[in-house]
Image (cartoon, grey):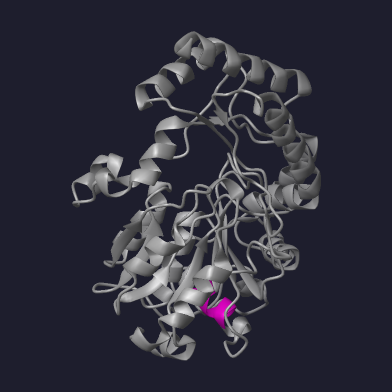
């Protein structure tokens, strides 16, 4: 079986993790701090805090920004459940909107229609690693500044709806000369096992607020929040006699460990090599499917944006959801693992029970019902790529004739 997305674990990773284990420092320590610094340098953002998951990082960020009951956060309906869950956990309302016709990303027109005086955050999701239209979203929040009602000093200082990018897929993507992480006011990355850059589990929050925000203070404050509200982490307490600490607030526990950061440091050092291989795989798939009448190949690069080649979202034209599922089953029978990204949230029990209906999101359902995600990863060989292509073509022909 050709797997869908295994992590790249080789001797370099093993050596670095082993070095972390033998260093005597396995929780948040020097490797985590270096990883944060390297992410900031790579992305070009103003500060970065490493966390144990995208989910924890984004939820803590929303709470830090003051999001709670009575607030609204706009998200795309076409996303993983984490995007909605973090909003719901704060007590705020997740306002789900449909995606655009050109790609799998959030519709600007639908965002506009969903903004109310209760809107505090817009959370665009860079599906598959292809950036959303951030300039258009910034134009919207400027347009609606007069209707924005802040509920704390930070919100009043910004003076508009905040843009918090769900960049779980898009580490390394480019938007108009900027890297993901330096585009939105805040950006949250995932370093889960299937992501381009992994730390096994993990994530990072990148801050890129206007210059009148003190990003060094934000970094310090956030580090306190993710460690139970404690005034010192374990590394700070290694200074002779510096055992005493305070708890400044009832915080959370979602810091990254040096074991995770050890993997991330290796991954980041060779990330461009990873992206290059992924791009080659995308181009090979494009060449194989572009002349097939049933194939709709994904948009992943244009004059302003370039994906980080995380997911290849192939669509099968004019098929039902049942036919798509049958094609997937046939591909698996050829010993090739594929996936679907994503089930729109109203198809899932948790959100149906809250009153969301897939009938309100026709574009999301159309794309979901015809989408198949193909394997893309550094260690996928040229021979395996050809096996995937052959399996897809054979399976489509078997199901559709």
Q: Is residue 350 above or below residue 35?
A: above
Location of residue 229 by image quarter: bottom left
Q: Position of residue 292 (x, y in %)?
A: 61, 23
Q: Is residue 152 left or right of residue 103?
A: left
Q: Where is residue 135 in the image (x, y as percent from the top left)?
A: 58, 70
Task: Determine if residue 311 is in view.
Answer: yes
What's the residue at 62%, 87% (across, down)?
211
Q: In this view, does 137 lie above or below 385?
A: below
What's the residue at 49%, 9% (across, down)?
401
Q: Position of residue 185 (x, y in %)?
A: 55, 74
Figure quadrant of the N terminus:
top right
How many numbered marks does the figure carry? 0
User: What predominant SS class does the magenta segment belong to?
Assistant: helix
Q: In this view, does 170 lie above or below 188?
A: above
What's the residue at 47%, 38% (across, down)?
341
Q: Is residue 186 magenta?
A: no
Task: Determine if residue 343 is in view.
Answer: no
Q: What stretch is highlighted in magenta?
A: 218-224
Q: Position of residue 36 (x, y in %)?
A: 67, 65
Q: Is residue 141 left or right of residue 268?
A: left
Location of residue 184 by image quarter: bottom right
Q: In this view, does 269 lie above or below 117?
A: above
Q: In the depicted view, which residue is nearer to us: 155 or 281?
A: 281
Q: In this view, does 224 lie to the left or right of 234?
A: left
């Amino acid at each position: 079986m050709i797997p869908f997305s295994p992590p790249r674990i080789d001797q370099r990773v093993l050596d670095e993790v082993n070095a972390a284990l033998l260093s005597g420092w396995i929780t948040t320590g020097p490797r985590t701090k270096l990883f944060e610094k390297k992410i900031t340098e790579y992305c070009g953002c103003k500060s970065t805090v490493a966390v144990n998951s995208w989910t924890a990082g984004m939820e803590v960020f929303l709470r830090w920004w003051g999001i709670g009951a009575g607030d609204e956060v706009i998200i795309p309906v076409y996303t993983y459940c984490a995007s909605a869950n973090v909003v719901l956990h704060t007590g705020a309302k997740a306002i789900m909107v449909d995606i655009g016709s050109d790609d799998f990303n959030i519709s600007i027109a639908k965002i506009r229609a969903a903004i109310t005086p209760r809107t505090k955050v817009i959370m665009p999701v860079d599906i598959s690693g292809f950036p959303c239209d951030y300039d258009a979203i910034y134009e919207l929040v400027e347009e609606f500044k007069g209707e924005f009602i802040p509920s704390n000093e930070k919100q009043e200082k910004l003076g508009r709806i905040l843009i918090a990018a769900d960049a779980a897929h898009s580490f390394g993507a480019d938007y108009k000369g900027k890297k993901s992480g330096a585009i939105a006011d805040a950006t949250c990355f995932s370093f889960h096992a299937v992501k381009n850059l992994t730390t096994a589990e993990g994530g990072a929050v990148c801050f890129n607020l206007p210059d009148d925000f003190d990003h060094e203070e934000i970094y310090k404050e956030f580090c306190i929040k993710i460690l139970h509200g404690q005034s010192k982490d374990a590394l700070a307490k290694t200074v002779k006699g510096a055992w005493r600490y305070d708890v400044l607030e009832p915080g959370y526990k979602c810091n990254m460990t040096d074991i995770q950061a050890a993997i991330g440091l290796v991954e980041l050092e060779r990330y461009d090599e990873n992206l290059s291989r992924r791009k080659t795989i995308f181009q090979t798939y494009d060449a194989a499917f572009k002349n097939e009448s049933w194939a709709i190949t994904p948009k992943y690069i244009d004059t302003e944006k370039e994906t980080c080649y995380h997911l290849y979202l192939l669509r099968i034209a004019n098929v039902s959801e049942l036919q798509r599922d049958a094609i997937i089953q046939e591909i698996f029978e050829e010993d090739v693992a594929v996936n679907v990204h994503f089930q729109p949230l109203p198809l899932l029990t948790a959100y149906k029970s809250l009153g969301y209906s897939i009938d309100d999101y026709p574009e999301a359902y159309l794309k979901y019902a015809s989408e198949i995600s193909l394997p893309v990863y550094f260690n996928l060989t040229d021979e395996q790529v050809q096996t995937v292509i052959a399996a897809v073509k054979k399976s489509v022909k078997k199901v559709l004739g």
